Image: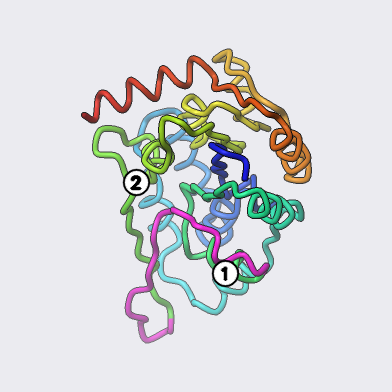
Amino acid sequence: MSAGLKLFIDFDGTIARGDVGNAFFRAFGGAVCQDWIARYHAGEISARACFAGERDAMGPLHRAEADAFVATRELDSGFAPLVALCRREGIPVTILSDGLDYYIRPLLEREGLGDVPRYSNKTSWGAPGDDGRAPLMLEFPFGNAECDRCACCKRNLMLGASGDEDVIVYVGDGYSDRCPAEFADIVFAKSDLQTWCQQRNISYLVFHDLHDVRRRMEELTQRRILRKRPRAEQRRREAYSAEA
């Protein structure tokens, strides 16, 4: 077992090829959904308000059509080998997503990975109308009452599952990965997160797909000493003290 290593990983754009959530809302809600996302990224609205706007733009859906869309999405072929490596080495893997369990669960189950622990925003279906369409209902059980940047607070979930002795690995690509990256010891980044890390002077390992992450994780398991990132460790102490 690789003592102390814990791996936390984003879903949309990291495990999944592309942002499934954004594609889903655009497919059924149209281009206006991109306007909601732009307002969210500009800091004009909260994450929950963005989700509500996208959901309202979609309106009620035929469940079969929504399910068929989700079925067309693909996962990075390197995710299963990465999970297998971590399980072999005793490294816990946890998925942290600011997306929806509606598409995350079936895509993982299709690949035989439905048992990987995961946290995300929750969905359910309302009563269908006479035309067979039903509203998609949203719940946010993992929000942060003190911060509305994300609907699912990855930072709190990551820190809550980690101890002082753990070396935290975070893998991500996008907007909602910025905050947890600041608290992780080892960051794998691409796309928007890579740019963010460069701007914030956060050390990171670039990856193109999860095969890259698996190879680097194999190297990490061979190290006798794994060093924590001092600034991340300090941020964690501050967060723990604030909660005390």
Residue 215 left/right relative to 100: right
Q: Residue 6: x, y in percent?
A: 54, 41
Residue 127, magenta (yes or no): yes
Question: In the figure, is residue 217 to the left or right of 92?
Answer: right
Q: Are marks 1 and 2 in contact (CB under 8 Å)?
A: no
Residue 11 placement (x, y as % from top left): 57, 50
Query: 164 or 120, which is in the foreground?
Result: 164
Q: Which residue is mark 1?
A: 106
Disc 2 marks which amino acid? Arg
* Disc nearest the viewer among 1 and 2: 1
Is residue 28 part of the magenta span, yes or no? no
The residue beneath circle 2 is 48
Q: Is residue 204 above or below residue 158?
A: above
Could you say which is closer to the camera, residue 205 or residue 13? 205
Q: x and y percent of residue 225 in the render?
A: 64, 25
Dot 1 or dot 2: first in sequence order is 2
Q: Which residues are magenta?
A: 111-132
238 sits to left or right of 32: left
Kind of residue indicated by mark 1 = Pro
Is the N terminus in the top left, top right, bottom left or bottom right quadrant? top right
